[in-house]
Image (cartoon, rainbow, N blue to C red):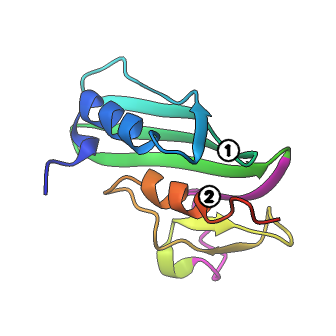
Amino acid sequence: MGESPLKSLNAYSSFVAELFDRATIARSNVIVWSDSPYTGIAEGEVYFVDGLRLRMREELDFDAGLITSYGYEVYRGEEKLFWYDDFPHPNDAAPASSFPHHKHVPPDIKRHRIPAPEMSFARPNLAVLISEVESLIATP
C-alpha cells in the first residue's frame, strides 16, 4: 500500500483527479488548494450523469495526514437527499456510535441523524461518497 494521499497537496490532488475520472461523473469543479505547505482545502461540486450532485468541502492537515473538518451534501436537482458532517451533537444519542461522524437523512433531514462509521478523519472519504452516489444513479 502506498503513502496516504492525505500527506501532501500533490498527492491529494492526484487522488481526487483519478477518483473523478469515471464514466458516472459528467464533470467536476472540485479544487484542492493550499496557502501553506501543511494545510489545504478541497471544495467544489461533482456532477454525475443522472442529475445527481455532490457538494463537498474538506479541510486538510497534510502534516498530520488528516481531514480536520468536512461537509458533504448530495442533491438530485435542487432536492437535498442527505448530507454528512462532523459537527458534534453530544446530546443526540442516535449517531453516538460513530461520534462525531454522522449522516442527516429524511424525514426530518435537519434533525434526523444516523451513525456514519464509514466516514473518517484518517483516510479519504470521497471513494465511499462516490460509491454511495453511484448506487443512486437511475434510481427514482
* Quadrant of the image containing the C terminus: bottom right
* Residue type highlighted by circle 1: Val
Local packing at callout 2 (Cα closer than 10 Å; few below 14, some 14-19, many 20+) is some
From the viewer's perspective, is residue 110 above or below residue 117?
Answer: above
For marks 1 and 2, give the one nearer the viewer.
Answer: 1
Q: Check disc 1 and report the residue beneath it.
A: 49
For label 2, the SS is helix
Q: CA distance from mark 1 to mark 2?
A: 11 Å
Q: N-terminal of the two: label 1 or label 2? A: 1
Q: Which residues are magenta?
A: 79-95
Does 31 appear above or below 93? above
Residue at point 29% right, 29% down?
A: 9
| Residue 125 image position (x, y, % from top left) | 44, 55
In front here: 85 or 53?
Answer: 53
- Of 106 and 60, nearer the camera is 106
Q: Where in the figure is residue 68, as x and y percent of width and height?
A: 40, 46
Mark seen at residue 133: 2
Q: Residue furthest front?
A: 23
Callouts 1 and 2 close, C-beta under 8 Å: no
Q: Position of residue 37 (x, y in %)?
A: 24, 23
User: Residue at 49% across / 75% down in the picture?
Assistant: 98
- For numbered disc 1, what is the local secondary structure? loop
Does residue 138 sit above or below 73 in this rendering? below
The residue closer to the viewer here, 139 or 15, is: 139
* Residue 30 visible: yes
